[in-house]
Image (spheres, coloured by chain):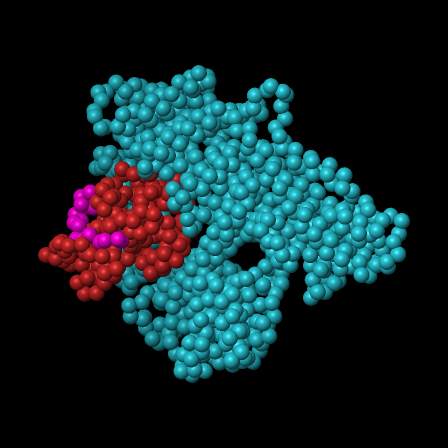
Amino acid sequence: MSKAELTVLERRLRPIYDGLDSQNYKKALAEIEKVLRKHPNTNAAKVLKALTLIRLDRTVEAMEILDAIDVPGAHHDELTLQAFIHCYKDSNQFKKVVTLYERAIQVDPSEQNLTQLFMAYSRERMYKEQQKIGLRLFKDFGQAPYYYWSVMSLILQANENPELGKKMLLPLADKMCQTQIKKAGYSEGSSAELEIQLLILEGQEKWKECAEFVDMPQAAALPLAPYNLVEKGMEYYMKAGEFEKVYDLATEAVQKLPDNWNLWKLIVETTIKQVEKLIDSEKKDDIEIMHSHVKKLGELIEKVQQTVNYKCRSPYIVSLFSMQSFGKMDKKIPDLEDFTPILGTRVEKMLQYVEHFYKKPVCYTDLQMFLHDMSAEEKNDFLEGLSTWINKVSTADEVPGDESKVWAIILTERCRRALGQNEKMSPAELRSLFQQFIAQIAAKDRGEHAQGVLANFATAHLWEAYRKEIKLLNHDLEKFYEMILLLEFIASTNQTDPLCKLSLLRAYADLCATGRITALQKSLDIKAIQLDTLGHMTFPVFETSGRFNLAIIQNTQLCMMYEQADKEIQDCIAQAYRNGKFSAIARMTAVSNKMKNSAQKTACEVMNRYLSAIFVLDDLDQIIVTLWGDDDPIGEKRIDWTQLQDTRDFNALPYTETPEYDNLLDDMKRRTFKELIDISELRSCMCRAMGAVGRILHENMDPRLARIQLKVTVMEFRKHLEYCYTEYPSILIPSKLPQSPAPLHLSQWVNSGGPQMILDYLEAAVELVDILDRGEHPEKTLIGSRTEMATKLIKLIDVQPKRTEGEPLPPFWIVDPIIKSSRALQTLATVQIVLRLLEQIVIKLAKNVPTAVPESGKGKGKKRKNS
Amino acid sequence: MTTLRPFDVMDLFKFNNVNLDINTETYGFQFYLHYMVNYPEYYQVAEHPNGQIMAYVMGKIEGRETEWHGHVTALSVAHDYRRLGLAAYMMEFLEKTSEARKAYFVDLFVRISNTVAISLYEKLGYVVYREIIGYYTGDRDENAYDMRKSLSRDPEKIAMIPLGFPVHSRDVD
């Protein structure tokens, strides 16, 4: 198609594009019909019609149009191809973009089409194929960058298969690269060749060559800041095992950059590596060398400490880090059991650190890394030293505007808590401590930063009480309430501290307080990637609270974010290829994978399908399509539950707890991740089984396949429900750690009787189809009587808290009934849909059943009455 | 303990402690990846030995002739890691990178209400070059100051001579 023809076509299609852009699909369809009436062979209009239908959730109709046009040998203009891409992207059929362009280049192997095919392969990680296209582009159009696209494809293949990579792919990439550079030299103003050469060397683990490479003058053109380049060189030498060299380089550099932690880390690590080389030797000389390495380290630390004189932290923390690192060595250095003469004592160093850096809010975070290395005796000494020090600080004169004292208190109390001192305190003592915190928070002219940290500490204190009382099944809800009041006070008065708001958000998630949650989300401005990484703090709340419309809005927002993220990452990958920025491609591919496999993403998509089908849609066909999911008509993807990744960020809320807390956190992360997957799989299985019932009704479904799918999906649902019964007994209480996600209450749902009731009806559906297919009449017992159903439903809606008359209701007593009511509503809505489907099945299949009515009842009529 | 390293795309999954700050905006992937791909030397992260992100700076180099300059797009320090001089350290890093790229000056935009940041930049040698009307839009509409500091390639400090009148955001590149 000529440029002029293309312009005419574009003008013709403009009103359709406008309709689509403004989401006025009715208008778009009308404009499409107008164009097709005048120019019936306009493929672009047909494809745009398919796109409109996809956006109207009429994927099956859309696919019919697309399948008729996207055929081998068809020649499509640019606008049609673009419309195709939108169709396939919107309906999650990215592989079809590949076939589309594979066909396109058969007819028109233009640079544009070949490039599009390369990018389509890149998206699908078809690196071997993209390698060929890169070469073809280079041969056909003679542009050097295309050659490197091909080389990059080899590197990506090597990343996927490191063994083959080292043996064959990377040497080939290296050879290709060398040949091209020899022939054409380095491109001016671009670092493409350098980046690719370095990637090849890294892939081959030629670390020494890597180090020498970044040392060359040309390496200055690499997209790295000058200092990053130096550090990269050291990293390579480290990997090459050149520890002495790294030690020397880092020692020299650290004297100019004494606060550079990376350099200190390298110095300690290389010292240990050098010692480890000799550790098995019993020779006197070797033992002396080992000792001298440690001594040299001690001397260096002391020398730098004298130079900086407490102006920076690294030279002081490194003493503690060295002790920790030597302590972790598998074998001990002969004749050197005590490092004290060289590195000093741990307690002494920590107390010195406290004394000099306590005014920095980071002081505790620095020390936290070493608190648990201490023996019981050291802990006692440290705490004693801390008490003496804080007493000294407390008695010092007050200086207006100086908050040193409060930071000293914060640090002391954080350390005491981390070392288990709070656990030894009586409730009265803890109360008194808490009141001291409140007094500090409320102190006149208290700075917002210190106030926020104090409030967070007080919150941790109250939350811990709330969590621990669970063991006695008597949640300390009053403390929880007190905590909310405190946090609300800080949230309303402190303009800069976001963490109190975040804690508050999490607290409200336990209480199903959706109104405040929405307001806090807005005020914290949680958006973009944060919707994923912090999504666990709110994700289930709207569903468990029965705010289904809000849940759908929230999930839709999240799904849109994922779609947008995927598009943006792919665009950036394409841009990186075009600009020769090869070093970023592999990492961007990794992040694209991570986002695609985010468990949060899948959980949102599944919940949206489930809630939309049971609460929003009315048309039975649409309900069936939604329940079954987008994936099936296309058959491209099924959820692989084992591949889902945890993208949740649990580090936003700080904590100051004893070492056991780390284990609790790890256990919570593992269990809540499993629960997120399990609840999503249960919803998904339920949806698919219901969708499969509906598919029995579809005229264009192979009846045999529909029946197999029905049996398989109902069986899958049963299996997963049984698994959930075992994994989530009714006594299971959701994690109450402040860092834990908002509770999903899977145990409540599974044991509410709701999913079982749905399963019973789905199994009845399987049997009903069998009976009707055999031309027989179903028994009344198949789905039970109205009385039986009523009994189950009454149990389901029995949500009132159990208590003896006159007994007062505990605080927040309403939360449990809210959750139960929400789940009961979901069950009722789901059962209603299943019964509507059963009714339609009877209407459809009863045609095959003889009219003679057996004794048990009136078959179809009876069913309808029951439903 | 200030080690800077280039930003890695996986940092997006753990930078909440920095980005929850009221003055730090969270953008879509394209924004971060664009800087990571095109200006990795200007996109640096300060990481604590415990693995947490302490702060980050993102910037770029742009302009022509005497307008060839480094630009600070974002600079943010997490609450727990404030009062350590990280912001100054990162600004110095960015200035050195711009020096190495032979830029004339470094500039940045800051909310006119963000007095803490403004006084920090002033301490670092930046001056208000001009006020930009309607630069920040959204929930908190606000004007911005365009602050500048000349590098060694601009010894006369021409880039720092204040414009003397405000300009509208639509007239700014």
- Left or right, residue A432 beside residue B113: right
User: In the picture, residue A629 is in which quadrant?
Assistant: bottom right
The residue depicted at 33 percent of the width and 20 percent of the height is A387
The range drawn in magenta is B119-135
- Could you say which chain is coloured red in the image? B
* Foreground pick, B22 / B39: B22
Q: Would residue A448 appear left or right of A112 to someone viewing this image?
A: left
Report the number of discs: 0
Front in this rendered view, residue A653 or A138: A653
Q: Where is residue A472 in the image (x, y as percent from the top left)?
A: 57, 23
Give yes or no for residue B124 being in the magenta stretch. yes
Q: Which chain is cyan?
A: A
Image: A560 above or below A26: above
Q: Which residue lies furthest to the left in this view?
A: B156
Q: Where is residue A52 in the image (x, y as percent from the top left)?
A: 52, 66
Question: What residue do we see at 43% from left, 35% from top?
Answer: A503
Q: Is A79 on the left-hand or right-hand side of A841?
A: left
| Residue A19 picture location, percent across and down | 46, 66
**Residue A699 at least partly seen:** yes
Q: Is residue A125 left or right of residue A834?
A: left
Q: In which quarter of the image is residue B68?
A: bottom left
Residue drawn at 61 percent across, 49 percent down? A614
Q: Where is residue A93 in the image (x, y as percent from the top left)?
A: 55, 64
Residue A161 position (above or below residue A317): below
Which residue is at the front of the view, B116 or A669?
A: B116
At x 51% / y 36%, what residue is drawn?
Answer: A512
Q: In which quarter of the image is the N terminus of chain A?
A: bottom left
* A574 lies above or below B81: below
